[in-house]
Amino acid sequence: MAVKLINKNEMEIGRIVQFHRKQAGLSRIDLADIAGVGKTVIYDVENGKQTVRLNTLLKIMISLNISIFLDSPLMDRYEARENA
């Protein structure tokens, strides 16, 4: 039997989403309506479930005005060489 471990990053994203939702005074149902997703999706995100699609997560984060920063040292080095 396979056991899925919850990744630390997934839990952190869930904590951030839940924090922003609560600070905005929104229920899970409110946020689901604003983001155009089901209320169980909000629950899944906040609890670090691995079944949420990236585009769905982005809808939720955009609804809460949360930005995502991607860091790619490999890409940075490649671009630095290309521009040198």
Image (tube, grey):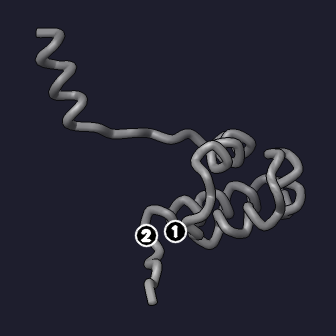
Horizontal side, residue 70 vs residue 14: left or right:
left
Horizontal side, residue 3 vs residue 53: left or right:
left
Q: Amino acid at mark 1?
A: Met
**Vertical position of residue 64 compared to residue 7: above or below:** above
Query: Which percent across, then down, holds residue 35?
Result: 79, 45
Q: Residue furthest bottom?
A: 1
Q: Secondary structure at mark 1?
A: helix
Mark closer to the observer (1, 2) = 2
Image quadrant in which the N terminus is located: bottom left
Dot 2: few (<14), some (14–19), or many (≥20) neighbours within 10 Å?
Answer: few
The residue located at (83%, 46%) in the rendering is 36
Residue 27: image tag: none
Query: Which percent across, then down, holds residue 14?
Result: 59, 64
Labelled pair 1, 2 in contact (Cβ < 8 Å): yes
Q: Secondary structure at mark 2?
A: loop
**Vertical position of residue 56 compared to residue 80: above or below:** below
Q: Amino acid at mark 2?
A: Asn
Frontmost residue, 19 versus 81: 81
Horizontal side, residue 63 vs residue 9: left or right:
right
The residue located at (70%, 48%) in the rendering is 60
Disc 1 to disc 2, how far (Cα)? 7 Å
Dot 1: few (<14), some (14–19), or many (≥20) neighbours within 10 Å?
Answer: some
Determine the image quadrant of residue 71.
Answer: top left
Query: Which percent across, then down, holds residue 49?
Result: 59, 69
**Vertical position of residue 59 compared to residue 49: above or below:** above
Residue corresponding to mark 1: 11
The residue located at (42%, 69%) in the rendering is 8
Residue corresponding to mark 2: 7
Query: Which percent across, then down, holds residue 78?
Result: 17, 24
The residue located at (24%, 30%) in the rendering is 75
Image quadrant in which the C terminus is located: top left
Q: Residue furthest top?
A: 84
